[in-house]
Image (cartoon, rainbow, N blue to C red):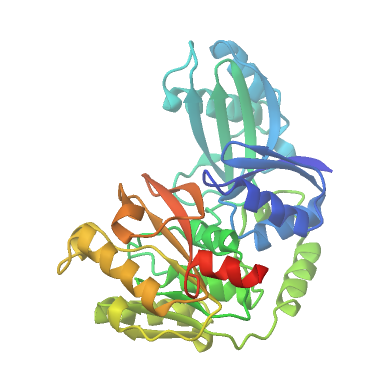
């Protein structure tokens, strides 16, 4: 059993911890934007393959005080790097520094750790591995907070939000991990409809479908960081990968998306097809007020547009119209809406029953739940007690 740290976005720590428990990982601890956990090798492989709300999984290999350059160098040099990779492999270092009196330059920290690694290889093997900042075999993470330094090896490699279904040349407004986190936070029952009336490129819909089919989010990935470790157990990973494929389930529910832009809907169709979930998602080019709604119960999960995409409504008018649509057509639904717009719930004319702070890119947002009752909440309560 080793200690690992799964990184995530602020607000998704509880969901990530629940996902770890569902994998059979019992020992966990919530941190800020992360969850630490104890796992064996098989569980590490499973976590990288299955976790929907993890950005990457780090394996700390050294934690100690680093109050000056020498202590930093000595800490990095004391790690047995030959246990992890060979001289003919490449590596890169990402360093981050917070509230340190000694270190104020993350590039300098990365260079000192690189020197320690290269010096160890020269001493023991006579040559040093090369640095590759674009596509390294081994990624090393250095985190300094005040005088505490943690050096980790990244087991994921490329960020786990890169599922393989999104065109890298298309800039989407929402990260896949955030979209998956919203699906899980909503508590959506896959036997009921899920609707995104501002679906854009379809990331929320795609992540919902992957969840509904129980498709491991990184089943399409060719390589993980641990694939390049010297102790990589290829047969064990192949077994876990085949188990993940066998664990997929049938799904014939309703996942519905629309957007006013025909061009964006065309791109959304390409994305959901690339993810292999196009048979379960209905897409159409129409505005939210034209959207027909299946009878509830169901879930609305959406990220309404703002800025350049509001070419026929200003923000206040668009949210007011959307709120009117929810009240008139979505009886029995729970509407989960993420927005960075101030006074959002006043514009939409509804009172949220729940608010969760999340970040969409650099925007401080709130994911809000609105319960769309048949009649009124007060009427429902009277009926229930009569």
Give residue 368's position: percent from left, percent from top: 46, 55
Image vertical order of residue 188 relative to residue 349, above or below:
below
The quadrant where residue 330 appears: bottom left
Q: In which quarter of the image is the N terminus?
A: top right
Q: Report the side of 116 relative to 109 (left or right).
A: right
Q: In which quarter of the image is the C terminus?
A: bottom right
In this view, the residue in front, 174 or 56, is: 174
Q: Determine if residue 199 is in view.
A: no
In this view, the residue in front, 343 or 227, is: 343
Q: Report the side of 338 relative to 146 (left or right).
A: left
The quadrant where residue 233 appears: bottom right
- Residue shown at 29%/56% (left/top)? 347
Q: Report the side of 140 relative to 21 (left or right).
A: left
Q: Determine if residue 386 is in view.
A: yes
- Residue shown at 50%/49% (left/top)? 356
- Residue shown at 63%/30% (left/top)? 151
Give residue 17's position: percent from left, percent from top: 69, 49
Give residue 164's position: percent from left, percent from top: 50, 68
Give residue 299's position: percent from left, percent from top: 51, 72
- Residue shown at 55%/24% (left/top)? 144
């Amino acid at each position: 059993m080793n200690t690992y740290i799964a990184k995530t976005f602020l607000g998704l720590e509880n969901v990530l911890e629940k996902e770890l428990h569902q994998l059979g990982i019992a020992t966990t601890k919530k941190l800020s934007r992360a969850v630490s956990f104890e796992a064996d090798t098989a569980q590490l492989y499973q976590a990288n393959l299955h976790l929907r709300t993890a950005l990457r999984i780090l394996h700390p290999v050294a934690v100690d005080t680093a109050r000056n350059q020498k202590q930093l160098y000595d800490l990095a040099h004391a790690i047995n790097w030959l246990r992890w990779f060979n001289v003919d492999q490449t590596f890169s270092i990402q360093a981050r520094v917070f509230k340190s009196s000694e270190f104020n330059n993350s590039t300098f920290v990365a260079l000192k750790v690189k020197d320690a690694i290269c010096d160890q290889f020269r001493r023991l093997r006579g040559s040093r591995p090369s640095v590759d900042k674009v596509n390294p075999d081994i990624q090393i993470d250095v985190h300094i907070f005040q005088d505490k330094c943690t050096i980790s090896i990244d087991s994921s490699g490329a960020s786990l939000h890169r599922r393989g279904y999104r065109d890298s040349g298309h800039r989407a407004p929402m990260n896949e991990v955030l979209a998956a986190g919203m699906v899980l936070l909503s508590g959506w029952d896959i036997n009921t409809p899920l609707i995104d009336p501002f679906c854009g490129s379809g990331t929320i819909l795609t992540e919902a479908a992957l969840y509904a089919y129980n498709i491991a989010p990184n089943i399409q990935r060719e390589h993980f960081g641990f694939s390049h470790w010297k102790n990589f157990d290829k047969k064990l990973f192949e077994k876990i990968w085949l188990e993940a494929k066998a664990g997929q389930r049938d799904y014939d529910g309703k996942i519905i998306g629309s957007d006013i832009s025909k061009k964006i809907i065309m791109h959304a169709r390409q994305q959901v097809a690339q993810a292999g979930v196009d048979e379960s998602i209905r897409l159409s080019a129409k505005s939210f007020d034209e959207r027909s709604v299946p009878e509830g119960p169901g879930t609305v999960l959406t990220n309404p547009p703002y800025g350049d995409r509001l070419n026929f409504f200003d923000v206040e008018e668009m949210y007011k119209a959307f709120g009117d649509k929810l009240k008139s057509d979505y009886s029995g639904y729970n509407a989960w809406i993420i927005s960075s717009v101030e006074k959002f719930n006043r514009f939409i004319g509804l009172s949220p029953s729940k608010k969760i702070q999340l970040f969409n890119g650099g925007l401080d947002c709130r994911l809000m739940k609105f319960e769309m009752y048949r009649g009124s909440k007060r009427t429902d309560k009277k009926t229930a007690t009569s």
